[in-house]
Amino acid sequence: MMELPARRLLLVHAHPDDESITNGATMAKYAAEGARVTLVTCTLGEEGEVIPPGLGRLTADREDVLGAHRAGELAAAMQALGVHDHRYLGGAGRYRDSGMTGLPQNRREGSFWSADLDEAAAHLVEIIREVRPQVLVTYDPDGGYGHPDHVKAHRVAVRAADLAGERAYRRDLGEPHTIEKIYWNRVPRSVAEDGFARLDAALPGLPFPRAAEVGDVPGVAADETVTTVIDGSAYATRKADAMRAHVTQVVVEGPWFALSNQLAQPLFATEYYELARGTAAGAPETDLFAGITGASPAPPAARNGHTDGRPAGTSGTPGGRSQVR
Ligand SMILES: [Zn+2]
């Protein structure tokens, strides 16, 4: 077997643009630090709307060529993030965007929502067994906000993570591999509320007519559900560039952005996660790989040695190994 990089991160997303909006800073940071970052996108986002009027002909109700166009946007976004391993689940175009909840496209033949779960998961098992990630990032069981493709991406990711570790399952897809930590994407409610408060103050000077609301942000949850904080502020520009690469989907203006509904949202350079499987090492964790044997960060000096529950030089700290935000 080829030698693997020390740190391997897999992200599973529904459509082109979800990765940059949700995890762009995290992806850029780990890629820059030498981790192998693998993105799997489940559909081409064929049912999306298009922001620039000059590209309106691309949509599903006109020429229906948005998917191929968005593949180009995603490739440009990966360049901006410095991520070199990007794949589509089952190959580009294998699963089609299912559209928003309740549309007839949900159940159309070939839609991701109508796909057989185990068949879709098998494609991901093959990738997991090849790349052998220690960490998987995807949406929560609600898909972050209920979009059928996001819900399905969650189900496929979890099913594939389970199957990949089963010794008896499909050995033709590679040697079994168990992912040590699985995270859901989150935004702490207080962070979202602070962001929208700042946005409301800035809105009169912005090219967006109105602001979205906290409830419009996928993955918002009570602060205490968040286990892990990735400070991506050094990669905020890369994240914004990656979002901008999704020309048909996103408009970025400073630390704000809007989707096709033109509702402004804060662009978060710090990204948040809920550890759903595995053991947290820190409260909050500041590294998705924290506690994973053999997955030292690039600069080893940055790590505090710890083998038991008590951090050096402190006493009486409940929970041990805790770090101050
Ligand atoms: Zn999406």
Image (cartoon, rainbow, N blue to C red):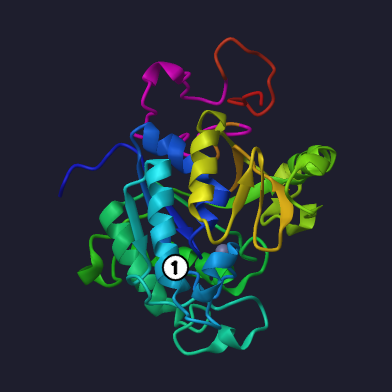
Query: Of 150 and 54, which appears nearest the observer?
Result: 54
Q: In which quarter of the image is ligand 1?
A: bottom right
x and y percentages locating residue 10 in the rendered image = 41, 52
Q: What stretch is highlighted in magenta?
A: 283-310
Tell me what residue is drawn at x 55 percent, y 75 percent: 47
Q: Residue at x 38, y 79 (%)?
A: 119
- Up-down relation of residue 88 to residue 192 (above or below): below
Q: Where residue 252 appears, x then y in whole percent?
A: 61, 46
| Rendered view: 169 above or below 217 | below
Give the percent coordinates (x, y) of residue 295: 36, 34
Q: Is mark 1 within 8 Å of ligand 1?
A: no
Above or below: residue 288 compared with residue 101: above
Residue furthest toward the front? 54
109 and 49: which is toward the camera: 49
Vertical side of 57 occupied by 215: above or below = above
In the image: residue 323, left or right of residue 238:
right
Q: Which residue is the extreme one toward the top? A: 313
Q: Looking at the magenta stretch, what is its main secondary structure?
A: loop
Q: Image check: 208 left or right of 140?
A: right
Q: Residue at x 45, y 18 (%)?
A: 302
| Rendered residue at 47%/72% (across/down) | 66
Q: In which quarter of the image is the C terminus?
A: top right
Q: Can residue 166 be seen in this view?
A: no
Residue flagged by tag 1: what amino acid is it? Answer: Cys
> Residue 118 falls in which quadrant of the image?
bottom left
Residue of label 1: 42
Residue 143 in sight here: yes
Reply yes or no: does residue 284 show up in magenta. yes
Magenta stretch holds residue 280: no
Q: Where does residue 153 sit, x and y in percent of width and height?
A: 51, 67
SS of the residue at dot 1? loop
Mark 1: few, some, or many residues within 10 Å (few <14, many ≥20)? Answer: many
